[in-house]
Amino acid sequence: MRKETPIRSIAKSVTWRVLATFTTIILVYLFTGKIGLSLAVGVLEVIVKLIIYYFHERAWVKIRWGLKNKNDA
């Protein structure tokens, strides 16, 4: 069984964020035809989603559901 390294997880996170933001930029451009607006929305999307993700992660720290002790089978 292979183990994923932290650097691989970081690379996957970054490439996913780039693809997701690019998708948002393309969609905004298709709807508006304005590249400036599309890029502005893309930049805001990255910032807002990072902030939302942080609070999402912090909320999950408080939720015990689905956690097992190391000694549990």
Image (cartoon, rainbow, N blue to C red):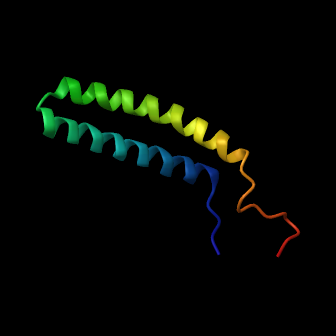
Image quarter of residue 36: top left
Q: Residue at x 59, y 49 (%)?
A: 7
Q: Position of residue 20 (x, y in %)?
A: 36, 45
Residue at the outermost right position: 71
Q: Nearer the viewer, residue 47 or 5?
A: 47
Q: Nearer the viewer, residue 60 or 18?
A: 60
The total number of labels drawn is 0
Q: Residue at x 42, y 49 (%)?
A: 16
Q: Nearer the viewer, residue 58 or 47?
A: 58
Q: Position of residue 25 (x, y in %)?
A: 25, 37
**Height in image: 11 above or below 45?**
below
Q: Is residue 67 left or right of residue 18?
A: right
Residue at the outermost left position: 33
Q: Nearer the viewer, residue 52 or 26?
A: 52
Quadrant assignment for the N terminus = bottom right
Q: Is residue 34 left or right of residue 48?
A: left
Q: Position of residue 21 (x, y in %)?
A: 34, 40
Q: Residue at x 50, y 47 (%)?
A: 13
Q: Is residue 39 left or right of residue 14?
A: left
**Height in image: 19 above or below 32?**
below
Q: Position of residue 46 (x, y in %)?
A: 42, 33
Q: Residue at x 60, y 36 (%)?
A: 55
Quadrant assignment for the C terminus = bottom right
Image quarter of residue 41: top left
